[in-house]
Image: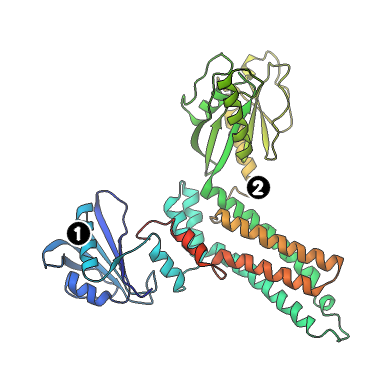
Amino acid sequence: MSETICAIATPPGRGGVGVVRISGSSIDELAERLIGKLPEARRASRVEVVDADGQLIDGGLALYFPAPRSFTGEHVLELQLHGSPVVLEMVLRACVAAGARRAGPGEFSQRAFVNDKLDLAQAEAIADLIAAASEQAARAASRSLEGVFSKQVHCLSDRVIELRVYVEAALDFPDEEIDFLAEGDVLGRVESLVDEAGRLLTQARAGRLLNDGLRIAIVGKPNAGKSSLFNALVRRDAAIVTEVPGTTRDVVRETIHLAGIPVTLADTAGLRETEDVVEREGVRRAEAELNEADLVLWVVDVTDEDPGPPPRTCVPVIRIANKIDCLDGPVPEEPDSVAISALTGAGIEQLDQAVAGRFDTAGSGSGEFTARARHVEQIELALSHLADARDVLKQTGSGELAAEELKRGAEALGEITGQVHSDELLGRIFSSFCIGK
């Protein structure tokens, strides 16, 4: 990565200020051609940027960060100019004429990773911070960027490696009278690692929710009040509401924020047997949405004597007893049920609290750091290997098999921070970044 790269680091469109970022080994030569000379390190300098013919492009500020104390670990020059897309593009062309090349998506962050300025999880946190959809997500991404998540992964990985080294050393002395596995409480240490990995997995799943959000499906029989509830939650008439059963034919989605987490709310067609071809397709889509949901709101009409069976799903279900405004007597209490009137708004606040409580029960209410699906998958894989190591020790006492499982568990954790990685993985991660980051 010795080539000097350049890119616009500010969002597309017009703005008061636009930033062109340059990184690489030939910054001094490039600066001489663009702005006359390299400015003093870490001090804003007033400069004029010229093109290859010496014609003035724009005036602004230049900041120079010499290696290795820069974001990428290389020499970095940033030009802060007027935020005209035309002006910034002219500066980029001047950079290319001076010997740089245009950077690819995420290439600055990738160079920072390669030069050990940050690990892979921290690099991903940069993209998460840019894409944060809520204040809670932004704060969690900042903590990930500071290394909160990485520190926990490294700590767990180090403990796994340390135990693996101990077990393999014990295997080198099979004739010793001392039982090294029992003497070192290997089983107890593995069980402790399983517990620690489980806690980290809970936190990572919470962090993934902050990034990806939660999918909630509203399901139930026709005319149970699903669309009325949907409108009450999104606080506008987003779905058509009529007294005619089967009005909702397609899935209607809206994004809201609940407990600091972005939630994709889906209103679905009423679940019932029907001969209507269009409505049958709506039911099929409703069932597909049910299978993709993280949480299901099952809407039941409290005046209906036959509300039907609960939806078949493996995710949590909250029963919504709707239309309590139509009751003359007290509302019957049901476990895991919230009584509401989507028409009057009664009980909606309690429903919000119930849904937020589901986040808290899953350990996702606070969100100490952001995480991605791949992080969750790798922690799940590491936990599986640690559990296998525990089971092997309990059932056979085989140190060889336990050591192999510990090795695989450490490798799974290493993929999170980039200690273990492939070029394909790096390409997939950094290609999703903005150009200029």
Left or right for 157, reference 8:
right
**346 or 263, which is in the foreground?**
263
Give residue 282's position: percent from left, percent from top. Answer: 57, 26
Task: Classify residue 94 by image quadrant.
Answer: bottom left
Left or right for 437, reference 380:
left
Q: CA distance from mark 2 to mark 1?
A: 51 Å
Give residue 320's position: percent from left, percent from top. Answer: 65, 27
**156 or 421, which is in the foreground?**
421
Left or right for 169, reference 254:
right
Indicate the secondary structure of the residue bearing disc 1: helix
What residue does disc 1 label?
A: 90
Q: Nearer the viewer, mark 2 or mark 1?
A: 1
Give residue 6's position: percent from left, percent from top. Answer: 30, 65
Give residue 402's position: percent from left, percent from top. Answer: 77, 70
In the picture, the quarter occupied by the C terminus is: bottom left
The residue that appears at 11% across and 67% down in the rendered structure is: 53
